[in-house]
Amino acid sequence: MIEKNVQFLSAVCTSLSGPDAVKIIETPIRTLGVNEVLIKVRAASLNFPDLLMTYGKYQYKPEIPFIVGLEGSGAVQSVGAEVQKFKVGDIVMFRGKTGACAEFKIANEDDVLPVPSNLSFEEAAAFGVTFQTAYVALVRRGRLQAGEWLLVHGAGGGVGQACVAVGKALGAKVIATASSAGKRGIALMSGADHVVDYHDGVFTQEIMSLTAGQGVSVVMDPVGGHVLNESVNCLGWQGRLLSVGFASGEFGNINLEELRRRGGELIGVRAGEYGRKNPEAGRTAHSELLELVECHNLRPYIGKIWKGQEIVSALKAMESREVAGKQVISFSEKAY
């Protein structure tokens, strides 16, 4: 039980000027709502939207100041009067729009899930956003089938690595692109059948060669810009091009006539909004994902584990792409 008026340390974005605006600040623990749980955070992970929010460039724009972080994991410390799903001591993972990078997190019980038995605290913190995005995109939006060709861009990043792992578990033939040998190695470790260097911005010829001129059924693109533009040329007949984000900083400008000629679809993916608009569908998708994870022992690839006081450096490493995989902030020891 946490006493009233207790302060906890949190990583707070104080202005919309980028990672340097994030400061370690004491924050009071407020009173729990009846459907809320208080979680002692053991680990949190960073996602590209966390970086964008420090600049005010993400579609969701929290009011300044706000605690950074979409997702994390920890142990339930206290529960509201009407909480039914969890009890004190339960090991859980959580997600929300902000608030993960702190010693404590208050969350509605509907935003909290039990941790799969095969995941550590750090892996659980890195799992939710990327793997849920991968599953919703590939299964619910992309309608990926076993035996189809799947092209995953940015395969050395969190979402890309999750898409490779989930796609392979679903029985797809996976081609992964990445900009460095190290990131392509991550894709191979995650199950990719082929890897392609897209650093020079040209990859269509190699994709068409690998698929014997057939093209791919599904493209998963979290990069945007020229990568999105060129991906249209990689589609097979009635292929699906999934736009998940714009890590390149550019939206792209695709050739709609080429898309039409291939009978293709351009599909926008927002996995979080998918669950918010239809909570039952979101819960079902997550249950299906957990079955896949446990059946195939899927895990997120963690590029580096940082301490709490290193969060600015972690955000900058994400921005410069100097570290592949998920960046995790550990709270297993004194974090600040």
Image (tube, rainbow, N blue to C red):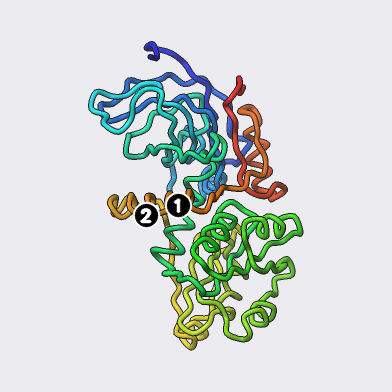
Q: Residue at x 62, y 60 (%)?
A: 191
Quadrant where the C terminus sits is top right
Q: Residue at x 57, y 64 (%)?
A: 224
Image position of 231 (left or right of 284): right
Q: Secondary structure at mark 1?
A: helix
Which of the two residues, 129 or 246, is positioned nearer the viewer here?
129
Which of the two residues, 189 or 208, is positioned nearer the viewer here?
189
**Residue under numbered circle 1:** 132
Q: Residue furthest bottom?
A: 261
Query: Could you say which quadrant of the image residue 231 lies in?
Result: bottom right
| Residue at mark 1 to residue at mark 2: CA–CA distance | 8 Å
Q: Residue at x 71, y 61 (%)?
A: 179
Circle 1 residues within 10 Å: few <14, some 14–19, many ≥20: many
In the image, residue 318 above or below residue 226 = above
Q: Residue furthest left?
A: 82
Q: Of label 1 and label 2, which has the lower sequence position?
A: 1
Please, what is the three-letter code of the amino acid marked with disc 1? Gln
**Residue under numbered circle 2:** 285
Q: Residue at x 33, y 30 (%)?
A: 86
Which of the two residues, 237 or 63, is positioned nearer the viewer here?
237
Quadrant where the N terminus sits is top left
The answer to whether marks 1 and 2 mark residues whose Cβ atoms lie closer than 8 Å is yes
Image position of 253 (left or right of 132): right
Query: Could you say which quadrant of the image residue 30 lies in?
Result: top left
In the image, residue 169 above or below residue 30 = below
Please, what is the three-letter code of the amino acid marked with disc 2? Ala
List x then y, in percent, for residue 282. 34, 52
